[in-house]
Amino acid sequence: GRSAGPVGSARIRNPRSPLRLMEGAPASNRAGRLPAARLLVAALWAGTLWALGYIAAPAAFGVLGSVQAGDLVAVLLTRQAWLSIACAVVLLVLLRVSTDLAPPRRRFLNLLVLAMLACTLVIFVGLQPAMAQLRELAGPGGVRASEYWTQFAVMHGVSQLFYLVESLLGAWLIVRLR
């Protein structure tokens, strides 16, 4: 027989079949990228939650003074909240356009993302501004040395609880996206 050479054997395309611009790449390849994109965004979201909440914040309070560490962590948490909102929006869009998911699974994943977003918003819109106001009212001595400490500590505990729930939901989301 005749050798195909380095290029390979040519295939004749049926003129009635759809034209693929990237020969050899199945049409489902794009659909195959959606699960990877969903998992990547979820991993970014959950990973930054874990890195900030369980590594960076405790390290800041271990190295810096309480007031400085509080200022640093407040800035980091604000940036984390904006990243969380962006990840939630991207995930919701990716879930909406995903044809590879059965409707019940898509609804469940949407609920997980919305629950995580709700945790972010409770912390970012509700608790963080109130805690920042108490820190400001406390003055340069810090909130621990002020009359606002108890109120701040309660809000901080509630904030930590929501952060823990969001972190656990993030782990669940990653597992369910696999």
Image (tube, rainbow, N blue to C red):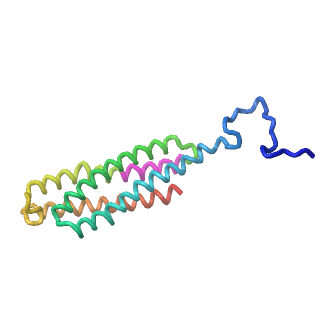
Is residue 9 shown left or right of residue 172? right
In x, y percent, where is residue 139? 7, 57
In x, y percent, where is residue 29? 62, 45
From this viewpoint, which residue is outermost toward the right?
Answer: 1
Q: Check the image and report above or below for 164 versus 127.
A: below
**Front residue of 94 and 48:** 48
Is residue 89 shown left or right of residue 101? left
From this viewpoint, which residue is outermost toward the bottom?
Answer: 62
Q: Check the image and report above or below for 167 versus 126.
A: below
Q: Main secondary structure of the magenta part?
A: helix
What's the magenta region? 103-116
In x, y percent, where is residue 19? 70, 32
Q: Residue at x 36, y 62 (%)?
A: 51
Is residue 84 shown left or right of residue 125? right
Q: Is residue 110 magenta?
A: yes
Q: Is residue 34 magenta?
A: no
Q: Check the image and report above or below for 106 versus 73.
A: above
In x, y percent, where is residue 33? 56, 47
**Front residue of 134 and 139:** 139
Q: Residue at x 70, y 39 (%)?
A: 23
Q: Residue at x 40, y 59 (%)?
A: 47
From this viewpoint, which residue is outermost toward the front?
Answer: 6
Is residue 163 shown left or right of residue 96? left
**Front residue of 140 and 100:** 140
Q: Quadrant of residue 28?
A: top right
How many tags in the picture?
0
